[in-house]
Amino acid sequence: MNRLCEITGAEFPLFAFSHCRDVVAAVSRAGGFGVFGAAAFTPDSLEAELAWIDANVGGKPYGVDLLIPSAQAVEEGTSHAEIARRVPDEHRAFVHGLLQRHGIDVAPERLHQPRSIGTQGAAEIMDIAFRHPIRLIASALGTAPPEMIARGRAAGVPVAALVGTAEHARRQLAAGVDVLVAQGGEAGGHTGEVATIVLVPEVLRTVAGRVPVLAAGGIMTGRQMAGMMAMGAAGVWTGSVWLATAESEVSETFREKMVAASSRDTVRSRHRTGKPARQLRSAWHDAWEAEGAPPALPMPLMSAASEPAISLIHRAADAGNPAAKELVTYFVGQGVGLVDGVRSAAAVVGEFKAEFAEAVGELCVMVGMSSA
């Protein structure tokens, strides 16, 4: 049996990261393994989301991904309201002016709502995750904290961590993680610069079989999955492909932009969270990168400055504001160029399985021919 499937209970080693509970449950029901991204959820809202998944996943396994940065510009436990107050007036005025220029007339105070990621209540968020029957817990950014490792061991829940270099892999191994996710620079969200096809074998060489390795970054098809596993990965960790599903959390405008986008339409930028994160390039990034724009703030101040505005942008775009559509962006990888339509999450799992089987069959034929 696949080692990763054995320790997580997954039927097929297709791991699907999503901020949407519907996607997580649908993927697990279809035989993959849904992983719920818990960033930006309060303890109460995370409890409600995980309870919903428990009730709708059909007894299938799923996991949780937590964003607990090891380095931030505020002290651990700083409230969201206090973080919002620390956003400089220059950045507040810039965001307000940008929205006004795109026909989004909003009172400035609505842009200063206390919303950010990776800051408050990390211990409480972890408590909630371990109250549910999760089969994997992942650290999305930075070295997995000792408490996560210890609690995972005690609960029999494997701990995974995302890495972007071989050095990151060595640190995570030293910390005691059970699974590594080698995420290349093609990926959406927080990511490094090394390409997936280089990073995966580099991490596999570093690991030397001590823990399973999932390949991530730009993987949108079952054939790509087969290729990663042919290199030695135990499975794949995917994210962007699920944004183009009917169940996903993204706006209709963003779905439309995904289908129209090419692989060259993404940008790795600090102008949303404060750390380098790959997103669909839009007028939002053009404005922040223009001469005279204020510099990106560190995490979590940048997300406090940007998230309320981006929520308003998506709502205005879906309501028919054409200028707002120019600003619409979301975290997505270079694999967006392979998106050609919107499907159900279950259909995507089925396509992965069929393409994977087809590719593996062709490889077996080639191997048989070469040994004949």
Image: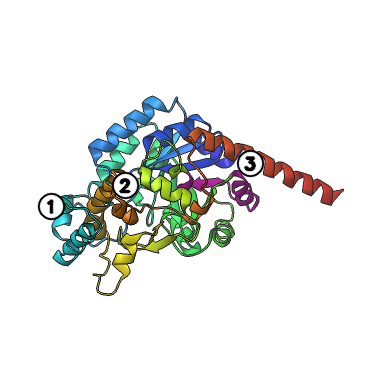
Q: Amino acid at mark 1?
A: Ala
Q: Amino acid at mark 3?
A: Glu
Q: Which numbered circle lies on residue 107?
A: 1
**Number of residues whose C-alpha sits closer than 10 Å to that of mark 2, classed few (under 14), some (14–19) or many (20 or more):** some
Q: Nearer the viewer, mark 2 or mark 1?
A: 1
Where residue 211 appears, x then y in whole percent?
53, 49
Of residues 45 and 330, the one drawn nearer to the viewer in this rendering:
330
The reply to whether residue 74 is visible in this rendering is no
Which SS class for mark 3?
helix
Magenta region includes residue 225:
yes
Of residues 317 and 177, the one drawn nearer to the viewer in this rendering:
317
The structure residue drawn at horizontal position 68% and vertical position 41%, both measured from the top left corner, is 358
Q: Which numbered circle lies on residue 355?
A: 3
Q: Which numbered circle lies on residue 321?
A: none
Magenta region includes residue 329:
no
Quadrant where the N terminus sits is: top right
Where residue 362 appears, x then y in whole percent?
73, 44
The part of the chain drawn in magenta is: 222-241
